[in-house]
Amino acid sequence: MFRFDWDDDSTAVAELARDFGRGAAAQERAAAEGGAVPDGLRAQAKDLGLLDLARSAEHGGLGLPALAVGHAVASLVAEAPGIGTALLLPEAASLFGEGPGVGFADGGQGHLGYRRPGELRLAGSRVDGSVAFAAVGQASPAYLLIAAGDDGDRFCRVGAEAVELSPASAMGLGAMGSFRLRASGDAQPLGACAAMERTALFLYQAPFFHGYARAALAYARDYAAQRKAFGRLIGSFQGIAFPLAEVAMEGEAAELLWQEAAWRHGQGEDAFVLAAQALRAAKDAAFLAVNTCVGTLGGHGFVDDHPAERWLRDVETLSALSGQRQALAQAGIAIETREEAEGIA
Amino acid sequence: MPDFAESSKEQTIRAYLHYFAESEIRPRSLEADRMADIQPDFYSVLDRAGISTEMMPRDPGAPRPAQPGDAPREHQTLRTAVMASEELSWGDASFMLSLPGPGLGGPPVSFIGTPEQRERFFRIFQDKSGPHFGAYALTEPEAGSDVAGIRTRCEEVPGGFRITGTKTFITNGSRADWVVVFATLGAELGRAGHRTFVVERGREGFSVGRRHHKLGLRASDTAELVFQDCFVPEENLLGGRAHYERQQSKEGFKVAMATFDSTRPLVAAMAVGIARAAAERARELVKDRYMLGRALPRYRAILESLDDMDRRVRAARLLTWKSAYLADVRQPQSRAASMAKAYAGGQAVQICREALELTVDSGEEPDPLLEKWFRDIRVFDLFEGTAQVQRLVIARRLFDEIGVKVGL
């Protein structure tokens, strides 16, 4: 029978992540403006094992299942969205059995065979091309890349000598830094990046949006509980309170869709469609949350005295990094629906 | 860790209820809607099939608000009930609402009824000679979502109370064997003046006013109940007089609220069932439709729309499941119940509309089932607390988390 509680281990890791996020929150703005997570914080996160949530035990990681990883990611990001994302998003290589310090970039054609100018191409054991905006966070001694091969997307591993990072211009995720990744040289071809691997990526990415949604909801609520207009707390106006209720509802719905997808993935079921739908719902819920947060703060939401405008930029940037919303919608179209459609004249 | 597994027993129950909905309810659905009543033969079919509201939370071991000294224990009652509610409503929600049994009157009798009252009022459902119903009378012409504003009076008299007032929109009201009635000792007492009674059919001063003609759910009986100096003996005061004294008199209002916490997930599940039926029907019908020489499913916009319906149905179901789960493990779930109700009701209204639009062209008669569900679903954004009331509850709980009363 279905249930929605968390086991003690998952709760402990999530609380650890949350507490770390609370401690880091004060440095959010400086990190975004400085273009990097302070070294001390990074070291602390590493010591706590937060950079190894999904990494296998073989590589010294915690080897947590997708559900537990996402629970921790969302808990951290909800407290320190920019820093949490900057620390954990670049760790996606750990999903695919890589050890610490391996950067990650997705330059393939994705689940739809989406072509882009200058994409990463893998031919034999050579990779060439670029990723206009890569979530690599910082320079790494090695990289796990997804590149387009002749028979679909494939993983390959390259050394730092084959990779060139140059500053890119993105409107958000300042704490992670913006890099264009150019790869050219020898690569070690690995396995295919097929539906199963894309599912793992979708499931890893969605909780970052959950975290932003939670942060924005809490901030807007707290503001509405102390800001007065017309002699009343603005939270007493239904025009303010109802949108917050909507944000809470959409956020909860998105998190539950993700939980089910992650659970099914963990059971070995094909959860590609569910994961794509969950990621899309997470993006929509996060945008609704940060946009509502900006609106709740009124003019204050538009200026950088508050984090709302930064979160709005962050969420859109994060959204761009994790695939087109429209493409996810297409991916989410249930296989059987597509098959039915294809079978019709 | 969250878990979405269904045991083989649960799979069997779901499959059986779905089979019943498909083979016994759906074929009767349109005719029942036309005649605004359930076909009499349905009840014998139901009896033979062994389906009743036994699965609803009414027995003494069922979920109820946690009391001091309660041992922590977990139930599966509401989780099973929401699953059943979805499947039967997939067939026709009017039939689901017309299942014999205590209905929405069950939870309050379970929650605060004395053992004697539970035994007395539930006993009638053991009688298999015909269908028996309970009902729940809270709404009044001037007080719907505003539970605290009810005006039906109860006046203390020797040996009991006299009730005077009108209740409206009461499901199964005209055929109920007994009705749980909420009344007040005086509006000036506020919530502390609320009392909850069970009033049996046939009591002098208790009559059925009229059956409402509705936009949808027409086969479901929805009636107005009139109480004119209706005497109710002391033993029909739910929980007994001591209960209200013990609970500092606010228990009547709390009972109404606690009832909503357990019934809103059931109503949400009904909306999920209808929305799922509409989404499935739309998917089936678009295959036979063409536009500009191409079958509709070959258009991406159509596929996206179908997929989006599927996603929203699943999200609504998960919110419903979570609120049922929280009730089963006796955790506070007002917010979750309101979320489930608001989300499922709102999305289901949209899904039914989209399904109708996807499958009908100018000059064409709408699919009768989709047309019916489009009418049926509208009330799911209204009853058991309107969409606005659910948002009030959710928003208040949000501010409660930081201990702030914003005056909402």
Image (cartoon, rainbow, N blue to C red):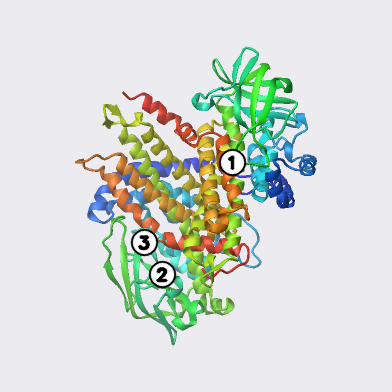
Mark 3 sits on what residue? B132
Disc nearest the viewer among 1 and 2? 1
In this rendering, position of residue A251 left or right of residue B91: right
Q: Amino acid at mark 1?
A: Met
Mark number for residue B222? none
Q: Looking at this rendering, what residue extends furthest in the bottom direction?
A: B158
- Per the model, the C-alpha gap separating discs 3 and 1 is 65 Å
Percent position of residue A54, x then y: 69, 35
Q: Nearer the viewer, mark 3 or mark 1?
A: 1
Write down the residue under mark 2. B138
Q: Residue furthest top?
A: A124
Pointer 2 and pointer 3 on the same chain: yes
Kind of residue at disc 2: Leu
Chain assignment, label 2: B
- Res B387 → quadrant: bottom left
Which disc is residue A171 wearing?
Answer: 1
How far across and down, in percent of the image, does residue B129 sit? 34, 59
| Helix, strand or loop status at disc 2 | loop
